Image (cartoon, rainbow, N blue to C red):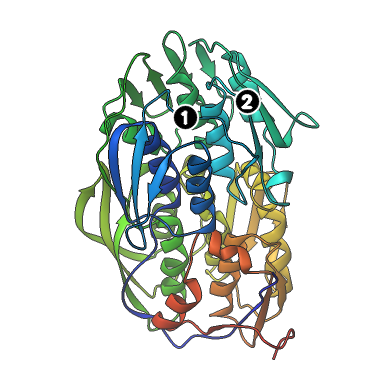
Amino acid sequence: MHVNWQAGTSKGLTGKFSVPGDKSISHRAIMLAALANGVSRIDGFLEGEDTRATARIFAQLGVTIETPDAQSRIVHGVGLHGLRAASANLDCGNAGTGMRLLTGLLSAQAFDSTLVGDSSLSQRPMARVMGVLQQMGAKITARDDNFAPLHIHGGQSLRGCDIDTRVASAQVKSALIFAALYAEGTTRIHEPRPTRDYTEAMLKALGWPIEYAPGSVTVHPGGQLNAGQIRIPGDISSAAFLIVAALLVPGSDLVLENIGINLRRTGLLQALQQMGGEITLFNQSEAGGEPVADIRVRYSVLSGIDLPETLVPDMIDECPIFFVAAALAKGRTRASGLAELRVKESDRIASMVAGLRAMGARVLETEDSVEIEGGALTGAEVDSFEDHRIAMSFAVAAQCAQGRTLIRDCANVATSFPGFIELAQAIGMNLVVDTSGAPQ
């Protein structure tokens, strides 16, 4: 289904709101609750297409999952060895996190599985995950040795070992961790740069013997997972679009409640504060082992920066909206170490560069870097390339552009931020579903 958006200049964003639950944590909560002993309740679950796909897959694998109300799940765990072979392919939809983490988990099962995805996910590289799992003894075959469908051959004896991931990816690391739960011997994982530690934190909270520090993880064998109550905070990746919009639109003063502020996810906040953004965290607490806070954002005059490369892994999903902030800041912004953006739902460097140039921005790109000269933007017709984060980024850019903007192919926003249009309108964004097919 093709959905286009029309957007224009906003007069200011105000109010106090929450955003949907964290997508990364929602995936992991379903997976680990399914492997736990006993019944777990998950609250704050993201009702997005990606996370629902993961829940459906575990139902196919023999796990009973109830939905007592929206954003809640009751998961009847089957224990570490209780999953059953599915009678059909396991469809991950657009969920790259789901597919990569499931590849690690299913590599350790006694039965065969086949993971499939939509047209976008079927073009995303999987060799990086397959390679490290094969070091543990997994047997996985794929189209062109890199793309879904992934055929995972069960009955393999996985062995713990020391593994250097060579790429800073929480998905690769987490796939290894899931496989390591079943491996014979201890598994030690080393990363070139620290990545988000949601899998490790949730495993520890549920009782598994695991040790971790920035850039390294040690998974010991022989543990078990204990069912419990899991509270999922608001997704900072979803909040990012509203945070940047409030910084950019004159007159804005916005409060976002109960947002997850895991240190490995707050790179964008640090970058925006370096640019002069007025962002305040308060009511800090903890939910389900994760730090949370309310975030107040006020309109600010931003200045371009040289983005510290050390921040990139902690804001990799937020880079598209960061590019929008850079395009509307004073002066020049440079960012490098961005190669991972080339293999997301779209080539996010190419997608953002094309749209920003269409809106009048001056942007230079290399394989792993961008240089953006801040200035005024003009409404234009831009393509999201069926990428939810690209669509929402240009919806924000349009709030500060002169004239109307048409954003094409926005249906995939439902994968991570259901209700985005309604929330955007409620805070004052000038954004509607397009019914004409052409800019007004």
| Helix, strand or loop for disc 2 | loop
Q: Amino acid at mark 1?
A: Leu
Residue 24 locus on image (x, y percent): 45, 46
> Whole-percent x and y of residue 130?
64, 26
Residue beneath the point at 46% across and 19% down: 180
Q: Can I make out residue 306 in this image?
A: no
Please tell me whether residue 125 is drawn above or below residue 244 in the rendered image.
Answer: above
Observer-nearest residue: 54 or 337? 54
Residue 427 visible from this viewpoint: yes
Task: Give the amino acid at mark 2.
Answer: Asp
Q: Quadrant of the C terminus?
A: bottom right
**Which residue in the protein does label 2 denote?**
112
Secondary structure of the residue carrying tag 1 is: loop
Neighbours of disc 1 within 10 Å: few (<14), some (14-19), many (20+): many
Q: Residue at x 52, y 69 (%)?
A: 329
In the orientation shown, which residue stands out farthest toward the right? Answer: 144
Q: Pick whichever, 295 or 299, lies toward us.
A: 295
Q: Where is 414 relative to 37, above or below? A: below
Q: Which mark is residue 212?
A: none
Looking at the image, is 153 positioned above or below residue 433?
A: above
> Separation of disc 2 and disc 1 at Cα?
12 Å
The residue under the point 62% across, 51% down is 94
Q: Quadrant of the N terminus?
A: bottom right
Question: Camera-side residue: 263 or 157?
Answer: 157
Viewer-side residue, 7 vs 206: 206
The residue beneath circle 1 is 83
The answer to whether the residues at label 2 and label 1 have Cβ atoms under 8 Å apart is no
Disc nearer the start of the sequence (2/1): 1
Name the spot of residue 34 as percent of width and height, x first: 39, 36
Q: Report crowding for label 2: few under 14, some 14 to 19, many 20 or more residues within 10 A (C-alpha).
A: some
How many marks on residues?
2
Residue at screen point 54% across, 64% down: 414
